[in-house]
Image (cartoon, rainbow, N blue to C red):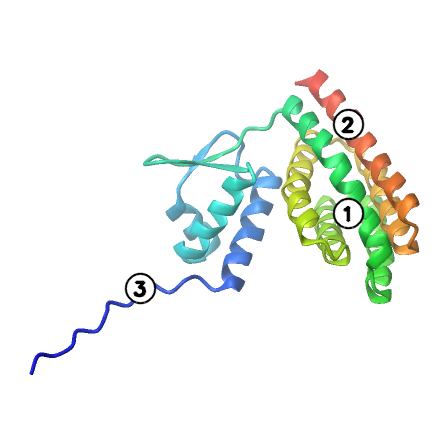
Amino acid sequence: MTAVRKPREEAAAPSPTLASQAYQRLEELIVTARLTPGTVVSEIGLARQLGIGRMPIREAIKRLDAEGLLVVLPQRGVLVSPIDAGQFRLQLETRRPIDRLLAECAARRATRGERDELRDLATAILAAAGRGDIEAFLAADRAFDQLVATASRNPFTARAAAQLHAHSRRFWHAYRDRDDLPESAERHAGLMRAIADGGAEAAASASDRLIDYLDAFAQAAFGRS
C-alpha cells in the first residue's frame, strides 16, 4: 500500500501582535531619525536590531513601504525615505480634508471614556512640552492619532490618515527647535479638547488650525533646507 504523502506545511504567518510591534518600533526609529533618512538598511539587520523575527519585520517593511516611509529595493535592501519639505506640504494638502472628517466623526461618535482619554492626553502633551520631553510628546501624539482613529468609527478615513500622521511626526521631529514644542502642543491639545467636547464644527476648526501651524512650519523649514 502506497503511503499518502502529507502536503508540506507552509511557514506560519507572523502573529498579528509581533507584526504590529515590529511596525510600531520601526516607525518610531524612522520618525525619530534613528534610521537615518536616505540610508539603505537590510531586513536581517533590522530583525537583529529589534530582536524580532524576519517574518514580522518583513510584514512591517511592506506596510511602511506602502506608506512611503521605506522603499524596498529589490536585491539591494530597504531605503529609508529621504525627507523633503516640498513633498511634505503636498501631503498636508491631502491631510487637511481627511483630518477634518476624522475630527468631526470622532467628535460625534466618541464614547464618554474616549472623551476622558482625550482630555487626559491634552494634559499629557502640554506637560511633555513644558518639560521639553520630546519622546513623551511624540508618544502622546501617537496615542492621540490611534484614539481618534478608533473614536471616529470610520476605518476608511482612519487608514487614509495614519500614514500622513507618521510623515508629519517625522518631518516635525527633523526640523523642530526648542520654540516649536510649546506651540505644537497647544495646537494638538486644542484639537483633543475640541473633539472631547463633542462639537463637530469646533473640532474641524481646531483640526484646520493644527494643519495651518504645520504648513507654516513646513514653509519655514523649506526656507532653511
* Residue pictured at 83% horizontal, 64% vertical: 111
Q: Could you say which disc has been placed on residue 10 in the image?
A: 3
Q: Which residue is mark 2?
A: 215
What amino acid is labelled 2 in the image? Asp
Q: Nearer the viewer, residue 180 or 142?
A: 142
Residue 223 on image: x %, y %: 72, 16
Within 10 angstroms of label 2, few (less than 14), some, or many (20 or more) residues? some
Judge from the rendering whether residue 10 lies leftward or rightward of residue 91; answer left or right: left
What amino acid is labelled 1 in the image? Leu
Above/below status of 174 relative to 194: above
Q: Which residue is mark 1?
A: 102
Question: For numbered disc 2, what is the local secondary structure?
Answer: helix
Please identify the quarter of the rendering in which residue 4 is found: bottom left
Which numbered disc, 3 or 1, marks the residue that appears first in the sequence? 3
State how far apart marks 3 and 2 are (Cα). Answer: 48 Å
* Residue pictured at 72% horizontal, 36% vertical: 95
Disc 2 to disc 1: CB gap under 8 Å: no
